[in-house]
Image (cartoon, grey):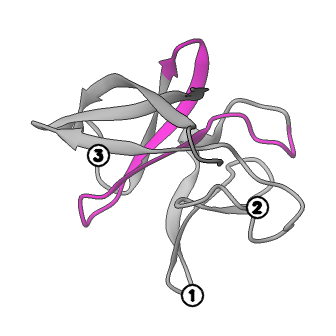
Amino acid sequence: MSAGTEVTTTWVAVCPAEQIVPETGVCALVEGEQVAVFRLADGSVWALGNLDPFSGASVMARGIVGDRAGVPVVASPVYKQCFDLRTGACLDDPSVALPAHRTEVVEGVVLVAAQEGMAT
């Protein structure tokens, strides 16, 4: 990013955090894009694209949440590749990644960053 460039973020309210059972995910439509939103037992919330790049199915919200060597992951429910919840990187194939969205919980409501654009 160069000087004079401003990043703008559109935050979309998804649902109350308490409606996501810990260690599971839900699917949300965020400005026309399916996003898989996960809440971990420690209360952290993560959001990745819902489309499994290996199977082509929109299933990531149904993935198995876990941990691989200290990295919070979700395993695809189809072929079981694991994706880092923090970055979207596939731990089984470094050439593949899911889009990762920033999240916040404000007054108990999960917000997902829909898009980021540049303005000068």
Q: Residue at x 34, y 59 (%)?
A: 40
Above or below for 34 versus 84: above
Please state which amino acid type lies under the numbered disc 1. Answer: Ala
- Quadrant where the C terminus is found in the figure: top right
> What's the mark number on residue 81?
2
Residue neighbourhood size for the residue with mark 2, other residues' Cα within 10 Å, grouped as few (<14), some (14–19), many (≥20): some
| Residue 69's disc number | 1
Q: Which mark is residue 77?
A: none
* Tag 3 residue: 21
Mark 2–mark 3 Cα distance, whole angstroms, equals 22 Å
> Which element carries disc 3, helix, strand or loop?
loop
Rate crowding at label 1 as few (under 14), some (14 to 19) or many (20 or more) other CA atoms within 10 Å. Answer: few
113 relative position to 106: left or right:
right
Q: Position of residue 72 (x, y in %)?
A: 50, 69
Instruction: Check if residue 50 falls in the magenta segment.
Output: yes
Which is nearer the N-term, disc 1 or disc 2?
A: 1
Asked if the residues shown at circle 1 and circle 2 are in contact, with their CB atoms under 8 angstroms apart, the answer is no
Residues drawn in magenta: 29-55
* 66 in magenta: no
Dot 2 or dot 3: first in sequence order is 3
Where residue 67 appears, as percent x and y from the top left, is: 51, 75
- In-front residue for pair 81/5: 5
Lower sequence index among marks 3 and 1: 3
Which amino acid, mark 2? Gln
